[in-house]
Amino acid sequence: MTTKDSSSNEAFLTLCNALIGGVGSLPDKSFLLGGGTVTKTEALSPLQDYVEADGEVKTANATRKAAVAKARTAKIPARAMVGNLKPYLKARLGKTNPLLESQFGIPAEKPPEVPVASKAAGAEKSKATRAAKKAAATAATQPATPGTKPAG
Protein backbone atom coordinates (compact mmCIF):
# COMPACT_ATOMS: atom_id res chain seq x y z
CA MET A 1 0.00 0.00 0.00
CA THR A 2 1.51 3.27 -1.08
CA THR A 3 -1.38 5.57 -0.38
CA LYS A 4 -1.02 8.54 1.97
CA ASP A 5 -4.56 8.19 3.27
CA SER A 6 -4.31 7.95 7.07
CA SER A 7 -7.49 5.86 7.30
CA SER A 8 -6.03 3.26 4.95
CA ASN A 9 -2.80 3.35 6.97
CA GLU A 10 -4.80 2.70 10.13
CA ALA A 11 -6.69 -0.06 8.35
CA PHE A 12 -3.41 -1.67 7.25
CA LEU A 13 -2.04 -1.36 10.78
CA THR A 14 -5.18 -3.03 12.14
CA LEU A 15 -4.82 -5.80 9.55
CA CYS A 16 -1.16 -6.34 10.51
CA ASN A 17 -2.06 -6.57 14.20
CA ALA A 18 -4.87 -9.02 13.43
CA LEU A 19 -2.54 -11.16 11.30
CA ILE A 20 0.12 -11.14 14.03
CA GLY A 21 -2.46 -12.38 16.53
CA GLY A 22 -4.11 -14.85 14.18
CA VAL A 23 -1.01 -16.33 12.57
CA GLY A 24 0.74 -16.40 15.93
CA SER A 25 -2.05 -18.54 17.36
CA LEU A 26 -1.84 -21.13 14.57
CA PRO A 27 -0.18 -24.39 15.59
CA ASP A 28 1.85 -24.51 12.35
CA LYS A 29 5.61 -23.88 12.65
CA SER A 30 6.07 -23.04 8.93
CA PHE A 31 3.98 -22.05 5.91
CA LEU A 32 4.24 -22.59 2.18
CA LEU A 33 4.17 -18.98 0.89
CA GLY A 34 5.29 -17.57 -2.45
CA GLY A 35 6.67 -20.86 -3.71
CA GLY A 36 8.82 -21.47 -0.63
CA THR A 37 8.66 -22.52 2.96
CA VAL A 38 8.59 -19.69 5.51
CA THR A 39 8.76 -20.15 9.27
CA LYS A 40 6.21 -18.54 11.51
CA THR A 41 8.86 -16.12 12.83
CA GLU A 42 9.91 -15.16 9.27
CA ALA A 43 6.27 -14.56 8.35
CA LEU A 44 5.47 -12.43 11.40
CA SER A 45 8.74 -10.48 11.57
CA PRO A 46 7.93 -7.95 8.80
CA LEU A 47 4.47 -7.37 10.26
CA GLN A 48 5.84 -6.82 13.75
CA ASP A 49 8.59 -4.54 12.40
CA TYR A 50 5.99 -2.42 10.62
CA VAL A 51 3.74 -2.16 13.68
CA GLU A 52 6.73 -1.15 15.82
CA ALA A 53 7.98 1.38 13.25
CA ASP A 54 4.52 2.89 12.91
CA GLY A 55 4.36 3.34 16.68
CA GLU A 56 7.75 5.10 16.62
CA VAL A 57 6.55 7.38 13.83
CA LYS A 58 3.43 8.30 15.79
CA THR A 59 5.51 9.04 18.88
CA ALA A 60 7.98 11.10 16.83
CA ASN A 61 5.13 13.01 15.16
CA ALA A 62 3.53 13.78 18.52
CA THR A 63 6.89 14.95 19.86
CA ARG A 64 7.45 17.09 16.77
CA LYS A 65 3.99 18.63 16.99
CA ALA A 66 4.59 19.51 20.64
CA ALA A 67 7.99 21.01 19.79
CA VAL A 68 6.53 23.07 16.92
CA ALA A 69 3.75 24.37 19.16
CA LYS A 70 6.29 25.30 21.83
CA ALA A 71 8.47 27.11 19.27
CA ARG A 72 5.49 29.04 17.89
CA THR A 73 4.45 30.09 21.38
CA ALA A 74 7.99 31.18 22.27
CA LYS A 75 8.40 33.10 19.01
CA ILE A 76 5.79 35.74 19.89
CA PRO A 77 7.61 37.26 22.91
CA ALA A 78 10.95 36.77 21.14
CA ARG A 79 9.75 38.89 18.20
CA ALA A 80 8.52 41.55 20.61
CA MET A 81 11.91 41.65 22.34
CA VAL A 82 13.74 41.91 19.01
CA GLY A 83 11.42 44.79 18.13
CA ASN A 84 12.47 46.54 21.36
CA LEU A 85 16.19 45.75 21.16
CA LYS A 86 16.76 46.93 17.58
CA PRO A 87 15.89 50.61 18.18
CA TYR A 88 17.69 50.57 21.54
CA LEU A 89 20.93 49.29 20.01
CA LYS A 90 20.66 51.67 17.06
CA ALA A 91 20.22 54.60 19.47
CA ARG A 92 23.04 53.43 21.74
CA LEU A 93 25.62 52.58 19.05
CA GLY A 94 24.44 54.78 16.19
CA LYS A 95 22.30 53.59 13.32
CA THR A 96 25.28 53.52 10.91
CA ASN A 97 27.69 51.71 13.27
CA PRO A 98 29.15 48.58 11.63
CA LEU A 99 29.14 46.84 15.03
CA LEU A 100 25.37 46.55 14.74
CA GLU A 101 25.72 43.92 12.03
CA SER A 102 28.97 42.27 13.05
CA GLN A 103 28.14 41.90 16.74
CA PHE A 104 24.34 41.92 16.91
CA GLY A 105 23.20 40.80 13.43
CA ILE A 106 21.22 44.00 12.84
CA PRO A 107 21.85 45.56 9.42
CA ALA A 108 23.36 49.01 9.89
CA GLU A 109 21.91 51.87 7.90
CA LYS A 110 24.15 53.37 5.29
CA PRO A 111 25.13 56.97 5.94
CA PRO A 112 23.47 59.32 3.48
CA GLU A 113 25.69 60.09 0.51
CA VAL A 114 25.98 63.76 -0.29
CA PRO A 115 26.45 64.43 -4.01
CA VAL A 116 29.66 66.20 -5.04
CA ALA A 117 27.71 69.17 -6.42
CA SER A 118 26.07 69.69 -3.02
CA LYS A 119 29.44 69.55 -1.29
CA ALA A 120 30.88 72.15 -3.67
CA ALA A 121 27.85 74.42 -3.22
CA GLY A 122 28.16 74.08 0.55
CA ALA A 123 31.85 74.97 0.43
CA GLU A 124 31.12 78.10 -1.65
CA LYS A 125 28.33 79.15 0.70
CA SER A 126 30.60 78.61 3.70
CA LYS A 127 33.36 80.69 2.09
CA ALA A 128 30.92 83.52 1.32
CA THR A 129 29.52 83.44 4.87
CA ARG A 130 33.03 83.66 6.39
CA ALA A 131 33.94 86.59 4.10
CA ALA A 132 30.74 88.44 5.02
CA LYS A 133 31.30 87.91 8.75
CA LYS A 134 34.93 89.02 8.45
CA ALA A 135 33.92 92.19 6.61
CA ALA A 136 31.25 92.94 9.23
CA ALA A 137 33.74 92.38 12.07
CA THR A 138 36.40 94.68 10.56
CA ALA A 139 33.83 97.37 9.86
CA ALA A 140 32.61 97.25 13.45
CA THR A 141 36.12 97.58 14.89
CA GLN A 142 37.19 100.61 12.78
CA PRO A 143 36.88 103.91 14.61
CA ALA A 144 34.20 106.25 13.36
CA THR A 145 35.49 109.28 11.49
CA PRO A 146 33.82 112.64 11.80
CA GLY A 147 31.00 113.00 9.36
CA THR A 148 30.38 109.26 8.96
CA LYS A 149 28.05 107.00 10.76
CA PRO A 150 29.53 104.03 12.59
CA ALA A 151 28.73 100.68 11.04
CA GLY A 152 26.45 98.29 12.77
Image: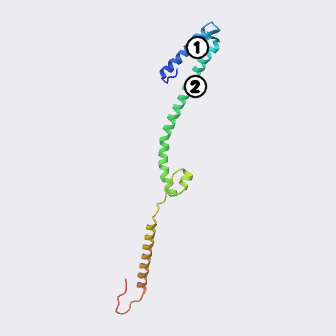
Residue positioned 56% across, 13% down in the render: 19
Q: Is residue 27 above or below residue 59?
A: above
Image mark for residue 36: none
Tag count in the figure? 2
Secondary structure beneath dot 1 equals: helix
Q: Quadrant of the C terminus?
A: bottom left
What amino acid does circle 2 point to? Glu
Callout 2: SS: helix
Q: What amino acid type is highlighted by mark number 1?
A: Ile
Mark 2 neighbour density, 10 Å: few (under 14) some (14–19) many (20 or more): few
Percent coordinates x, y for residue 98 in the rendering: 54, 56
Residue identifier under label 2: 56
Mark 1 vs 2, N-terminal side: 1
Residue 100 is situated, as x and y percent measured from the top left of the image, at 53, 54
Tell which of 16 and 90 is nearer to you.
16
- Disc 1 to disc 2: CB gap under 8 Å: no
Q: Is residue 140 left or right of residue 46?
A: left
In the rendering, at what x and y percent does residue 70 appear?
Answer: 51, 35
Check disc 1: other Cα within 10 Å, few if <14, some if 14-19, many if 20+: some
Whether residue 92 sits left or right of residue 128 in the image: it is right
Residue in the foreground of this view, choosing between 72 and 14: 14
Residue underneath mark 1? 20
Tell me how far mark 1 sits from mark 2, CA to CA.
18 Å
In the picture, residue 48 is in which quadrant? top right
Vertical placement of residue 86 versus 20, above or below: below
Q: Quadrant of residue 142?
A: bottom left
- The residue located at (43%, 85%) in the rendering is 141
Measured from the top left, where is residue 36 in percent x and y?
Answer: 64, 11
Furthest residue to the bottom? Answer: 146
Q: Residue at the spot x=44%, y=73% of the render?
A: 124
Tell which residue pokes out farthest to the front in this image: 35
Which residue sits at x=56%, y=15%? 17
